[in-house]
């Protein structure tokens, strides 16, 4: 397959590198000139549990410079850059091109559907982690999975080909018609821990330094779960709460991506996470006071004059 990756940061470069190693033709599309130059000059330096190596058979371009339609376009920008990126990459979107988002948050299928026939849009969720370690360098440690589906629920040939390609790359992918529950469960987890850490500057573990830190996080999980249920999505709230408790106890030093964005002076993905939950809650007249307050606070952090 010819696979284009739009947003070749930590996740996009990891997926692109592994898909290229599996023999697919991969084009990385990004706006980070230093990263593109490093990949074009010396290849992508990829470090996983399988070791450190260079992936050389990658093309790396700015989105507007890509001229050939791809069979599959995987979007891995942060959610706030999806539309600008797709707008610049229109030449990659042929009449047959399928689109896939494994980005965090809600609204990804709708954003992709603005640029292609919604019948060709796939969405999902991944637990693979990745970090960018400088221009041309990414790493990922531990194991992950991918669950995805066609956004309209159809079992298309392209869905099977995409699952196969991601499995060729060792990414442990399954087609799963129940992916909405997994997406909302990840949103519930992130709405709690990402926003609390982004506002306070606390690592995940530091949220337990006051007695009611854990209960505050769990209240946000409960609010998001209530909104999901009102929209007909059967989330497992107990499972998410257990994951939050586990992270508070065992991932104490972790800085969630939203806190990393704040510390680096970048805007966060708050609109696609707490913002989308508040919007979905309003639609069903459900009160989500903690999720909403965190949204307002992270918006203030994002809008600071000093950034
Ligand atoms: P990242 O910041 O490392 O990468 C995003 C890339 O998009 C950057 O290289 C940036 O230059 C590029 N970009 C920005 N604007 C662009 C544009 N207009 N056109 C093309 N490229 C553009 O982010 P990431 O950590 O790889 O995360 C990507 C998505 O995956 C997010 O939604 C995130 O929440 C989700 N996610 C991340 C992880 C993780 O461990 N990193 C895990 C699961 C899901």
Image (spheres, rainbow, N blue to C red):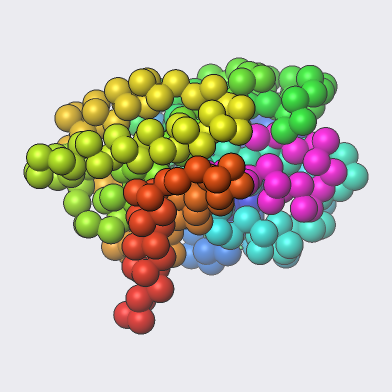
Q: Say left or right for 172 vs 70.
A: left
Task: Out of 233 and 272, give the one closest to the viewer.
Answer: 233
Residue farthest to the bottom, as pictured: 305
Q: Going by the image, does 14 lie left or right of 122?
A: left
| Position in image of residue 158 (x %, y %) | 79, 27
Relative to 271, say whether 225 is above or below.
above
Locate residue 226, reporting x and y percent.
47, 33
Stretch of the chain drawn in magenta: 105-123
The x and y percentages for residue 195 are: 34, 51
Q: Is residue 204 left or right of residue 279?
A: left
The residue lying toward the viewer, choosing from 197 and 278, is 278
* Quadrant hosting residue 181: top right
Q: Residue furthest front?
A: 285
Q: How many numbered marks does the figure carry?
A: 0
Q: Is residue 216 visible?
A: yes
**Does the magenta-highlighted stretch encompass residue 119?**
yes
Residue 183 belongs to the span the image colors magenta? no
At horizontal 30% and vertical 23% (from top left) the residue drawn is 242
In the image, 301: left or right of 104? left
Residue at left offset 61%, top offset 47%: 283
Instruction: Please name the residue shown 42% across and 46% down the image.
Output: 288
**Residue 57 shows in this picture:** no
Q: Furthest residue to the right?
A: 95
Q: Position of residue 218 (x, y in %)?
A: 29, 35
- Relative to 222, say whether 213 is above or below: below
State the quadrant of the N terminus.
top right
Question: Residue shown at 40%/73% (left/top)?
Answer: 303
Tell me if residue 287 comes above or below residue 163 in the rendering: below
**Image quarter in which the C terminus is found:** bottom left
Query: Residue 211 occupies which quadrant of the picture?
Result: top left
């Amino acid at each position: 397959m010819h696979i284009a990756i739009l947003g070749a940061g930590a996740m996009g470069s990891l997926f692109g590198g592994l898909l290229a190693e599996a023999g697919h033709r991969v084009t990385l599309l990004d706006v980070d000139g230093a990263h593109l130059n490093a990949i074009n000059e010396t290849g992508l330096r990829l470090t996983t549990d399988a070791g450190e190596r260079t992936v050389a058979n990658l093309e790396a371009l700015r989105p507007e410079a890509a001229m050939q339609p791809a069979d599959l376009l995987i979007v891995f920008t942060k959610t706030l850059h999806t539309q600008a990126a797709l707008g610049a990459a229109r030449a990659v979107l042929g009449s047959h091109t399928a689109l896939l988002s494994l980005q965090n948050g809600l609204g990804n299928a709708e954003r992709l559907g603005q640029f292609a026939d919604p019948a060709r849009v796939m969405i999902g969720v991944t637990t693979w982690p990745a970090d960018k370690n400088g221009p041309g360098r990414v790493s990922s440690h531990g194991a992950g999975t991918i669950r995805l589906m066609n956004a309209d629920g159809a079992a298309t040939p392209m869905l099977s080909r995409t699952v196969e390609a991601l499995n060729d790359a060792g990414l442990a992918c399954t087609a799963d018609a129940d992916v909405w529950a997994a997406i909302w469960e990840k949103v519930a987890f992130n709405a709690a821990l990402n926003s609390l850490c982004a506002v306070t500057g606390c690592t995940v573990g530091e949220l337990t330094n006051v007695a009611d830190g854990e209960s505050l996080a769990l209240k946000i999980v409960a609010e998001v779960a209530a909104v999901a249920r009102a929209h007909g999505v059967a989330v497992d709230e107990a499972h998410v709460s257990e994951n939050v408790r586990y992270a508070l106890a065992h991932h104490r030093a972790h800085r969630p991506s939203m806190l990393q964005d704040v510390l680096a002076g970048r805007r966060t993905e708050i609109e696609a996470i707490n913002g989308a939950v508040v919007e979905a809650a309003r639609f069903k007249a459900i009160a989500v006071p903690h999720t909403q307050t965190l949204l307002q606070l992270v918006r203030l952090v994002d809008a600071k004059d000093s950034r």
